[in-house]
Amino acid sequence: MSKVLLIDDDVELVSMFQEYLEQEGFDVTTAHDGEAGTAAALTGQHAIAILDVMMPRMNGLETLRRIRAASRMPILMLTARGDDTDRIVGLELGADDYVTKPCTPRELTARIRAILRRTAGTPMDQLASAPLVVGQLTMWPEQRRAAWAGTTVELTSTEFNLLEVLARHAGKPVSKNILSEQGLGRPMARFDRNIDVHLSSLRHKLGTLADGRSCLQTVYRMGYQLIKD
């Protein structure tokens, strides 16, 4: 049974989500402010956290920042419809994905399951037990571990998934639609900036090539490419 941590100050909404998730087989813990949510998240007892942006005492973005400083657990943000700034900042701080409010319990559950499937290991992860090596990049899919030039690279679950997709297609452009389907576990939505934000974060975390270029290149009208060097 997967343990879900639900952090939101809307008591009525939390109660509705909790009841639905428990009916779907999840073990749900709740917190109604950022401080309590951070403390619960850092116990290491939960498979995923669902985090609302707007909360008292400590908002969701600061809560996300504190959790990410000490934990790589998957985090799904709840954001207001049309609030692109919070969405982008949340992704930059390490959120794995987001759902806009209002959302249905069924939609939230589907997104949770998609993230947990990716985190637990997808069929792509099981293609080989040997490391996946592309130039200075080495990935161990079964352990969900990555290194650049022998130095460990700390990645969120979504960053790891996207990088693995690119690594398995190294030297070839990969479209945003494929990255969204294989890396996020869902079709790409219109005006969705998720892929761009995650790839920007990956560029900062990975090293450069011998000529100083980023190993991750944008290919005009085609997507992204991991340079095979």
Image (tube, rainbow, N blue to C red):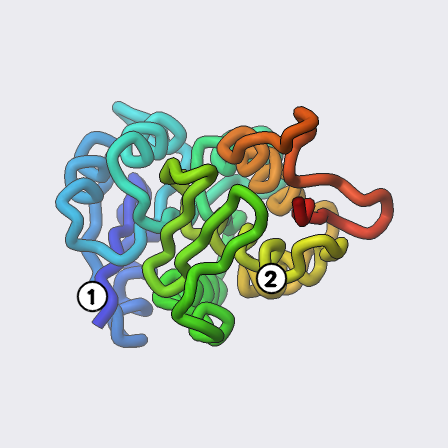
Residue 87 in view (yes/no): no
Nearest the camera: 88 or 208? 208
Determine the residue located farthest toward the right in the rendered image: 221
The residue singled out by tag 2 in the image is 168
Residue 138 in view (yes/no): yes
Q: Residue at x 27, y 61 (%)?
A: 18
Find residue 85 and report its horizontal and vertical position in percent.
58, 29
Q: Residue at x 55, y 51 (%)?
A: 163
Q: Of label 2 and label 1, which has the lower sequence position?
A: 1
Q: Residue at x 40, y 58 (%)?
A: 140
Between label 2 and label 1, give the one nearer the viewer. 2
Mark 1 closeness class: few <14, some 14–19, many ≥20 residues within 10 Å: some
Q: Quadrant of residue 188?
A: bottom right
Q: Residue at x 27, y 47 (%)?
A: 11
Find residue 38 and report its horizontal and vertical position in percent.
22, 36
Q: Is residue 192 left or right of residue 68?
A: right
The residue singled out by tag 1 in the image is 27
Q: CA distance from mark 2 to mark 1?
A: 35 Å
Amino acid type at circle 2 is Arg
Quadrant of the drawing holding the C terminus: top right
Mark 2 closeness class: few <14, some 14–19, many ≥20 residues within 10 Å: some
Quadrant of the drawing holding the N terminus: bottom left
Q: Quadrant of residue 55?
A: top left
Amino acid type at circle 1 is Asp
Task: Determine the secondary structure under disc 1.
Answer: strand
Nearest the camera: 97 or 14? 97
Q: Quadrant of residue 217?
A: top right
Find residue 62 and report its horizontal and vertical position in percent.
35, 26
Task: Determine the secondary structure under disc 2.
Answer: helix
